[in-house]
Amino acid sequence: MITEIVQLEIKPGEEKDFEAAVAMAQPIFKRSKGWKSLEVHRSIEKPSRYRLFIIWETLENHIVDFRESKEFQEWRALVGPHFASPPEVEHANKVAAF
């Protein structure tokens, strides 16, 4: 399992619209190969900043299967209009849990 961590800056005033768009995207992720879960976190100090934590079975499930799919295009069509800047994306492996 890998975690995709996405930091997003949302246009001020569009936070609730962005959250609604993410909720509408739930079926898109559910039908994506290797997708396991998605958490959306909103910054307290910077309320236009969000972090998504998306669990995939493999890195390839995200960077190949999802990114090259129609599901990715649907996802971006829903949420992309709310981005103030391009997303920052990284991937991580869990090394410990306490």
Image (cartoon, rainbow, N blue to C red):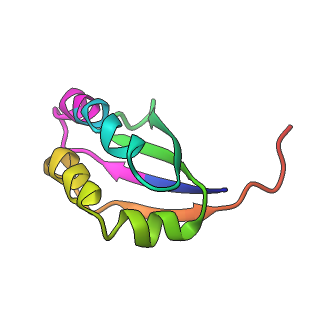
Asked if residue 31 lies in the magenta stretch, the reply is no
Residue 6 % position (x, y):
44, 54
**Residue at left offset 13%, top offset 49%:** 81
**Residue at left offset 46%, top offset 56%:** 33
> Where does the C terminus fall, quadrant-wise?
top right
Q: Is residue 56 above or below residue 50?
A: below
Q: Let me know if residue 53 appears in the view.
A: yes
**Along the line of sight, which residue is nearer the eye, 84 or 65?**
65
Residue 43 % position (x, y):
44, 35
**Residue at left offset 27%, top offset 55%:** 71
Q: Let me know if residue 48 appears in the view.
A: no
Asked if residue 8 lies in the magenta stretch, the reply is yes
Magenta highlight range = 7-20
**Along the line of sight, which residue is nearer the eye, 66 or 12?**
66
Residue 48 % position (x, y):
31, 39
**Along the line of sight, which residue is nearer the eye, 21 or 41?**
21
44 relative to 96 in the view: left or right: left
Quarter occupied by residue 70: bottom left
**Along the line of sight, which residue is nearer the eye, 16 or 13?**
16
19 relative to 64 in the view: left or right: left
> Where does the N terminus fall, quadrant-wise?
bottom right
11 relative to 30 in the view: left or right: left
Residue 86 % position (x, y):
27, 63
**Residue at left offset 70%, top offset 60%:** 93
